[in-house]
Amino acid sequence: WYEASASQGDYYAMFKLATTSEDPCSVINQCPPGSKKSSDWLDLLIKTATPRAVSGDAEAMAILYNATAELKWLEKSAAAGYAPSQWLLANRYAEGEGTFLLPWKRKNAEEELLKSASEGGYSPAMIEYISILFQRNDLESVRYWWEVAAKTGYQAAVASYGAYLSHTPDKVGYSIDLVKGYALVSLLKELDGGGNIQAYVEGKLPQIAEKMTPAQIEEAKKYAIEWKATHPPLSFYPEKLGF
């Protein structure tokens, strides 16, 4: 199925085929005639993505970065406004990649990239940008971005936003809202994808519930249903690509 997708020009499928080292037919040396090797798929990926990138396709630029590890493609993708690339480039700069004459210029670039990626709607960037704002004690902006991030369905943001609204703990200065806080944390019950999220829910919900009346808990259950119906589904936001 990856090959069928790649043959129609999908470069995500090409990338998967180019980076798969345990192709079963290769292992047993029984690949069908005409089958491409991973290096062939990589060549095709680069040939397919390059014209798109040159024409201004920021996502194709990001694909080329993952295919070639050339930072220039990630920088071009970020400059073109692709939020996931802005977030990734901020992290690459934080890891020491790229050239900056002055250390503070690197830090400024990281923050600007995270801010742009957040404004572009990329939730993982919002969490990192919030950390910068919190260190600066800009709690008004922190509260704003926690809410925005939670509304995207990012599980880490939903978990923290619910906890802070219910003052378990009161870390950023929200007005207490036990109903909404309980509702949001309870939504995480449906996730089963790692990160110890179920242990978090099992520990956090009782802390919130002990502050609430039975009527408030019933109201929270209704609010959770409404939130789920009007917001994106919960997600761990895994990356599509990576080395």
Image: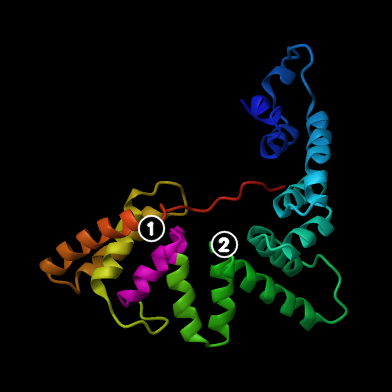
Q: Secondary structure at mark 1?
A: loop
Q: Give neighbour class at mark 2: few <14, some 14-19, many 20+ (Cα, 10 Å).
A: many
Q: Give neighbour class at mark 1: few <14, some 14-19, many 20+ (Cα, 10 Å).
A: few
Q: Which residue matches tag 1?
A: 231
Task: Residue 237: give x, y in percent of width and height.
Answer: 53, 53
Q: Is residue 173 left or right of residue 182?
A: right
Res. 190 in view: yes
Give the residue at x 71% y 33%. Answer: 9
Dot 1 and dot 2 residues touching (CB under 8 Å): no
Cα distance in 3D space between marks 1 and 2: 15 Å
Amino acid type, residue under disc 1 in the picture? His
Q: Is residue 29 left or right of residue 146?
A: right
Is 39 rendered above or below residue 211? above
Give the residue at x 40% y 55%. Answer: 197
Q: Mark 1 vs mark 2: which is more N-terminal? A: 2
Q: Mark on residue 42?
A: none
Is 94 rendered above or below residue 231? below
Q: Look at the image and tell me in which quarter the N terminus lies.
A: top right
Res. 168 in view: no
The kind of secondary structure the magenta stretch mainly shows is helix
> What segment carries the magenta color?
150-168
231 inside magenta stretch:
no
Give the residue at x 57% y 87%. Answer: 136
Q: Which residue matches tag 2?
A: 122
- Toward the viewer: 197 or 50? 50
Is 154 rendered above or below residue 103? above
